[in-house]
Amino acid sequence: MAKPRMIKTIFSPNKSLAAILHVANQSSGVSFHTLSKVLYFADRESLSEFGRTISGDRYIAMRHGPVPSSTYDMLKAVRDNHPWHPQYETLCESFEVRNNYRIFAKKAPDYQLLSKSDTMCLDQAIKTYGRMSFSKLTEASHDEAWKSADENDAISMEAIVRSLPDGDILMEHLRNPHPGRSAS
């Protein structure tokens, strides 16, 4: 029997930036921690409802919960003044980081990059998780997907999907989006 296809995503730095700005504009001074968890829960919702994530980022199982890897690199590039990041100038024009971990938007997101469903999932995650304390947010994000990975390792998309309601059905759809056609 052939090994099942892995679920792959393609990271979009532009969509990630739009999501950062959307959250930062809704929650002025949002922390890296809160932003990371809001994006994680928005991606879970988007996967569950629409079969896709918002930016295609991969999540790392950090001590205090899942962290979107490439998005975190974008935040650190601004915070740590890393001009060699490919989007450094655009990032610095878009937001600033104060007090080492608080994100403040300098402009509105490009809503042409975010679908209505992306915005809906982000808004729901902001509403549910955006004002939680650090410890409550950490606890909420220590779900089965986070537990499936070792600390500082990637959380597989399969683990995230399996942790969702109807995860088995969604997993089959994501691995074989065209029923009746074999994967090549």
Image: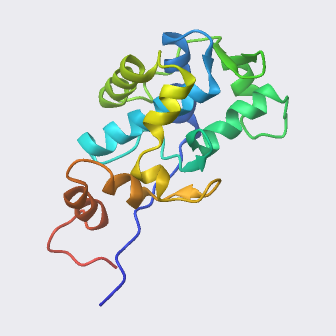
Q: How many marks?
A: 0
- Residue at x 42%, y 45% (from the top left corner): 143
Could you say where residue 114 lies in the image, as x and y percent from the top left? 41, 29
- Residue at x 69%, y 31% (from the top left corner): 75
**Looking at the image, is 107 positioned above or below residue 16?**
above
Q: Is residue 128 left or right of residue 82?
A: left
- Most extreme residue toward the left, as rendered? 180
Quadrant of the drawing holding the C terminus:
bottom left
Could you say where residue 83 lies in the image, as x and y percent from the top left? 85, 34
- Residue at x 61%, y 38% (from the top left corner): 71
Q: Nearer the viewer, residue 183 or 30?
A: 30
Q: Is residue 153 left or right of residue 2?
A: right
Q: Nearer the viewer, residue 125 or 132?
A: 132
Could you say where residue 115 lies in the image, as x and y percent from the top left? 35, 30
**Looking at the image, is 144 positioned above or below residue 86?**
below
Q: Is residue 119 left or right of residue 168?
A: right
Residue 175 picture quarter: bottom left
Scheme of colours in the image: rainbow
**Looking at the image, is 12 positioned above or below residue 134?**
below
Could you say where residue 2 lies in the image, as x and y percent from the top left? 33, 87
Quadrant of the drawing holding the N terminus:
bottom left
Residue 122 picture quarter: top left
- Residue at x 43%, y 56% (from the top left corner): 157
